[in-house]
Image (cartoon, rainbow, N blue to C red):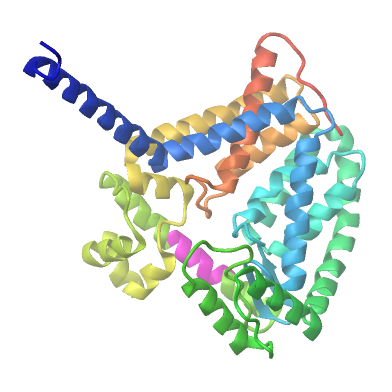
Amino acid sequence: MGRRGNPAALFIDIAAHARNILRMDFINALLSSNLVQLALTFSLGALLGVIAYFDKNQRLMKLTLAILSLSIIASFVLTIGEVYQYSPYYKRAFAIFGDDISTTILLPLLLASLYRHPGWYWLGLVALLMTGGKTSIILFIIGLVAIGYCNAGSARILLRRTAIGLLIAVPAYFAAGHIGNMPDVKAYGVALVAKENKIEAPKVVDRETVLKLNLAIHEKPGEVKLYAGTVLGFKHCTEIGNCLYKQSENALRDRLLSAAAGLWMTLQGGYPGLSMEGFVDLMMKNNPWGLNDKYNLTAADWARMAMPQNAFTHFGAAYGLWFMLALIAGLLFIAMLGAYSIQRGMRGSGSAYAVFFATVVIVDQTQIYLTAHSSILLMLGVAAGAILLAALQASRGAQPPLYTA
């Protein structure tokens, strides 16, 4: 009797086929999981970190710095990509990378501060200033001070390089902003955006026509093209000082309130897969710790925050307290390994990797980077790969390399 005529054999075939299908579904579901993709992003960064660690000329990080910096500068001048212009003199540009780029660029920038040729460092300083990332600038200052402390013999050189770099970056910022405000340059940027998105460019370039172009881009079906989502137009403030004050005040308030909401969600056990609309409904329905009443928060306020604006409470809000604590413990362990390697004599670029990792993990409490495909998380992985390798060498009695490419 063949297998077709054997009910038992037929049942076994069907069961095996079903098991294979279930396995495929499980694997696909596993790979599409945010937690798995988060781990893959960090692991990819760690692999790149191992490669960069053995690259005495730091070619990979130099290339990264050049690509990021030139993209930001082009975005700033031509107003292409994600750009926010608050006044003729106050502008922020993120190219196609999003606002995470202002922190992502810090690792190659801190490394460049130790290179023999300061041109890389000055290029990165110009780009950092053009992103206008207040948190990132604070992280950069802290990181630079720490690197100066770790490389005491280079402290004066770092100070002199930074002073010269600022003398270059500040005039470059205003000069690039002036060039970007020229009608022909504006028209060229808008035409480029329209061309990349296969939309007819407006004949007159002003705030209204550009906003209409943006709307057409976002409503256009299909894949988002390069430079999609250009934002041009003036916000609610007009002077640099006023803009900085309003942005800092509003951003700090929103981040503190959303972090408190994220902590409440974490203590509730987490809400995986919660959308922005779900977050707003959850906050309005539960009124965590009476925040709505104390601060007169409305659904529009929570919608503006969109999610917990803190890396750890954002992660905990999805996966709960114990997963959050385990993640924090792992990150702090890597930061301690970096400090251990520095104590054992790691200097040069090795110290920059350790300083970047510790600075972001410990100080940066206002950005969401523990998410899949986060460029900041990728750079943390790069730093972690170098730190783990240096710690492994140190544990075997080997001297970590001293690179000042």
Image spot of residue 237 (x, y percent): 61, 82
Residue beneath the point at 82% across and 43% down: 113
Q: Would you identify the image quadrant in which residue 56 lies?
A: top right
- Above/below status of 359 relative to 99: above
Closer-to-camera residue (50/166): 50
Q: Is residue 175 left or right of residue 44?
A: right
Regarding residue 129, the answer to whether it shows in the image is: no
| 402 over 129 or under it: above or below | above
Q: Is residue 93 left or right of residue 271?
A: right
**Magenta segment range?**
248-256
Main secondary structure of the magenta stretch: helix
Residue ID at (52%, 66%): 251
Any part of residue 200 in sight: yes
As drawn, which residue projects farthest toward the front?
Answer: 1
- Horizontally, residue 250 falls left or right of residue 277, namely right
Using residue 317 as the reference point, say whether residue 72 is left or right of it: right
Quadrant the N terminus occupies? top left
Q: Is residue 335 magenta?
A: no
Q: Quadrant of the C terminus?
A: top right
Residue 102 placement: quadrant: bottom right
Is residue 249 highlighted in magenta?
Answer: yes
When the figure is inspected, residue 386 is found, relative to residue 92, above or below; the finding is above
Which residue is painted at 73% across and 53% down in the image? 68
**Percent position of residue 392, x then y:** 64, 16
Residue 314: image location, x then y, percent: 41, 50
